Image (spheres, rainbow, N blue to C red):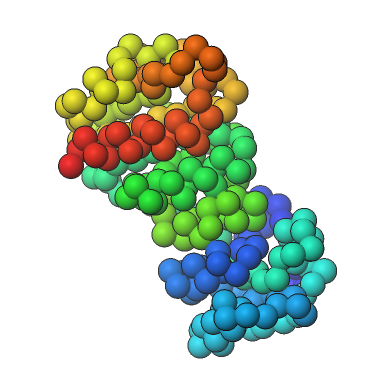
Amino acid sequence: MPSLKGYSQELEYSYTPGVFPSLELMRVKPEKAMRLLLSERAQGEGVEKLRQVCRENGVREEIADKALRRISGKDNCFAAVVFEKWQAELEADGPHVVLHHPMDEGNLGTIQRTLLGLGIKDIAIIRPAADPFDPRVVRATMGALFSLRVKQYDSFDSYRAEYPRHALYPFMLDGSVMLEEATRQVQMPYALVFGNEGSGLPAEFAQMGQAVRIPHSNEIDSLNLSIAVGIGAYAFVHAAK
């Protein structure tokens, strides 16, 4: 493998900054691992477990403090695995979450981890958007990315063309029904659609499916995107049981 570069979306590989995300990669997708990077200061049970599982899977280990600092932007990143990126296919009959132009890496990572915790594994990301393979996103997912099916699309129409059967529930500040009402009779399979952190969904989404709003006090103008996704997904998952 050639010398490592700072991460960019054009690369065919990315990094898992941190011991725990690296262990999750090796647990779920060891075939994608290419290289183990360690700091000279790396030690402890988690590090030894990571080294062992990498050896068992034939993943080369090397000391790479400078690369770890460049990848993570921090001095306390002690391990990372270089891994091959991939494009997943969403499950045809399962619930989806569609993220329309999410731009914040921390939000995107938190959303992925939350959805995995709630049992939703299929996520469509509509570009332009934060890169789900950016090391900052990977770290924020705490390795949840490797257990999810995440697919990127250049437009919402492209997503819709692949999954025309999914009932759409766009979440909007002026959605026509409250969340509680929307979950009284959930149509299956469904797709929960959320907009950009700043601008939300374009107005035309109100005409697509059942527009939903999450009630909140007048003390704030809107909920954080990752919080809204967590609330909406929790309500739909439990209503559909």
Examine the rendering and report whether any part of residue 6 can be seen: no
Which residue is located at x 20 percent, y 30 percent? 186
Q: Residue at x 31, y 17 (%)?
A: 178
Q: Is residue 26 above or below residue 238?
A: below
* Count of numbered labels shown in the rendering: 0
Q: Is residue 190 left or right of residue 152?
A: left
The image position of residue 167, as x and y in percent, is 26, 29
**Whole-percent x, y for residue 50 in the image:** 56, 79
Rendering coords of residue 122 (x, y %): 37, 47
Q: Would residue 208 appear left or right of 14 to someone viewing this image?
A: left
Q: Quadrant of the N terminus?
A: bottom right
Q: Which residue is nearer to you in this view: 21 or 9?
A: 21
Image quarter where the C terminus lies is: top left
Displayed quadrant of residue 63: bottom right
Q: Position of residue 53 (x, y in %)?
A: 52, 83
Q: Residue at x 43, y 46 (%)?
A: 114
Given residues 30 and 108, the one toward you in this image is 108
Q: Residue at x 41, y 37 (%)?
A: 230
Asked if residue 69 lies left or right of residue 194, the reply is right
Vertical order, 96 against 61 (above or below): above
Choose between 124 and 234: the one closer to the eye: 234
